[in-house]
């Protein structure tokens, strides 16, 4: 290689928070959009977490632009505080969906009451009433469901379809038919002059509400995971060559000797070598009473040590610990 030629930049991994995912088709669309960005080597979208992991040389700004052009929202997650950033993005999206659902459902409920009580004139006889109603309905649909129509349009431009396509076709067809029947009733047989404005907005409102409830459930799961992850200490007091030192848990290996002092959490799974104490294992078994521990007994990472001091040898680390397996199952 020519010494004057600069070395190629090593690939880096970028994590993005992606909003607006509603189905597997959305996942495929976002992955395809990301892979089309120059410099991207691999892109993977996690539907459950609404995140994307991209490997390559492409800058985060270009990746976010690609996600936005595909009809979805995107924001970069930093290494530190990435989970907090993702949750903040989802909280904003949740509040927006709740507002949109409330407006659409309220408008649909009013229209339904008006139609069921007979207050509204017949579609073929009340053009002055139904045309303004159709325009107001369109405004509500654009406020509460604009993201479905833009998502469907962008998917169509890419030659694909997703759940946005289904929603846009269904509600858009209902509005167009109703508006045509209200504006030009003579073009329709008498028995076919019906308006479905309330159906269009209620469908959008209920789908928005469903998306908000799904987002809320996902947020609750994230909170539960964070509580589990916070059970594991960040450091462990390791005894090496007779000297005790605090070491990050990620750097502790198998068969290492760890000391747990009174009131501390057990950092990793192991077998007690020396000492006696009672350990609170309620996070694992639900048992409220501390369990006595002595030489030969097993201790689990994340449990809370009592008033004694324990010296134990690690037998499971990393993803093999009981706590890590619980997190994986959740």
Image: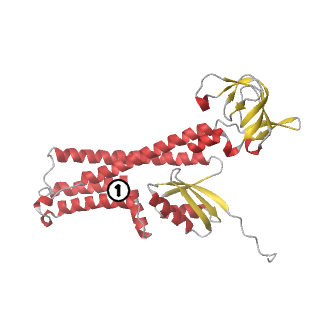
Please say if 311 is above or below 160.
above
What residue appears at the point 40 percent right and 64 percent down from the top-left corner?
161
What residue appears at the point 50 percent right and 47 percent down from the top-left corner?
90
Q: Quadrant of residue 58?
A: bottom right
Please say if 67 is above or below 325.
below
Where's residue 290, x and y in %? Answer: 65, 23
Q: Nearer the viewer, residue 279 or 193?
A: 279
What residue appears at the point 18 percent right and 48 percent down from the top-left corner?
115
Please say if 308 is above or below 221.
above
Furthest toward the front, the residue is 296
Exactly how many numbered labels are in the figure? Answer: 1
Q: Left or right: where does residue 141 sit relative to residue 60?
A: left
What residue appears at the point 24 percent right and 56 percent down from the top-left corner?
134
Quarter that holds the N terminus: bottom right
Where's residue 89, x and y in %? Answer: 52, 49
Quarter that holds the C terminus: top right
Q: Left or right: where does residue 247 sit relative to residue 13?
A: right
- Which residue in the protein does label 1 denote? 142
Furthest toward the bottom, the residue is 2
Furthest toward the right, the residue is 241
Where's residue 151, x and y in %? Answer: 42, 61
Q: Quadrant of residue 227?
A: top right
Rendering colour mode: secondary structure
Under tag 1, what secondary structure?
helix
- Mark 1 is surrounded, within 10 Å at the Cα level, by few (under 14), some (14 to 19) or many (20 or more) other residues, namely some
Please say if 227 is above or below 3.
above
Q: Nearer the viewer, residue 266 or 8?
A: 266
Q: Nearer the viewer, residue 261 or 210?
A: 261
Where's residue 222, x and y in %? Answer: 54, 42
Q: Quadrant of residue 16?
A: bottom right
């Amino acid at each position: 290689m020519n010494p004057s030629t600069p070395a190629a930049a090593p690939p880096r991994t970028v994590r993005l928070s992606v909003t607006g995912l509603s189905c597997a088709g959305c996942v495929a669309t976002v992955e395809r959009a990301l892979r089309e960005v120059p410099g991207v080597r691999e892109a993977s979208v996690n539907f459950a977490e609404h995140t994307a992991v991209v490997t390559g040389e492409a800058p985060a700004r270009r990746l976010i632009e690609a996600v936005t052009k595909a009809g979805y929202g995107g924001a970069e997650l930093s290494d530190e505080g990435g989970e907090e950033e993702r949750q903040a993005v989802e909280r904003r999206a949740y509040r927006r969906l709740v507002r949109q659902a409330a407006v659409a459902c309220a408008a649909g409920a009013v229209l339904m009451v008006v139609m069921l009580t007979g207050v509204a004139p017949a579609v073929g006889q009340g053009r002055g009433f139904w045309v303004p109603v159709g325009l107001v309905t369109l405004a509500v649909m654009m406020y509460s469901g604009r993201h479905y129509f833009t998502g469907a349009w962008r998917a169509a431009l890419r030659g694909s379809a997703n759940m946005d396509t289904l929603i846009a076709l269904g509600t858009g067809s209902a509005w167009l038919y109703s508006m045509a029947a209200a504006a030009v009733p003579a073009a329709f047989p008498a028995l076919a002059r019906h308006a479905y404005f309330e159906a269009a907005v209620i469908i959008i409102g209920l789908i928005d509400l469903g998306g908000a409830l799904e987002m809320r459930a996902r947020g609750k799961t994230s909170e539960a995971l964070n509580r589990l992850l916070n059970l594991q200490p960040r450091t462990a007091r390791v005894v090496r060559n007779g000297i005790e030192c605090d070491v990050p848990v990620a750097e502790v290996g198998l068969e290492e000797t760890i000391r747990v002092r009174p009131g501390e959490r057990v950092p990793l799974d192991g077998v007690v070598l020396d000492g006696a104490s009672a350990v609170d294992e309620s996070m694992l078994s639900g048992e409220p009473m501390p369990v006595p521990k002595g030489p030969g007994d097993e201790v689990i990472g994340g449990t809370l040590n009592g008033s004694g001091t324990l010296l134990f040898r690690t037998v499971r680390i990393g993803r093999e610990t009981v706590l890590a397996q619980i997190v994986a199952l959740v």
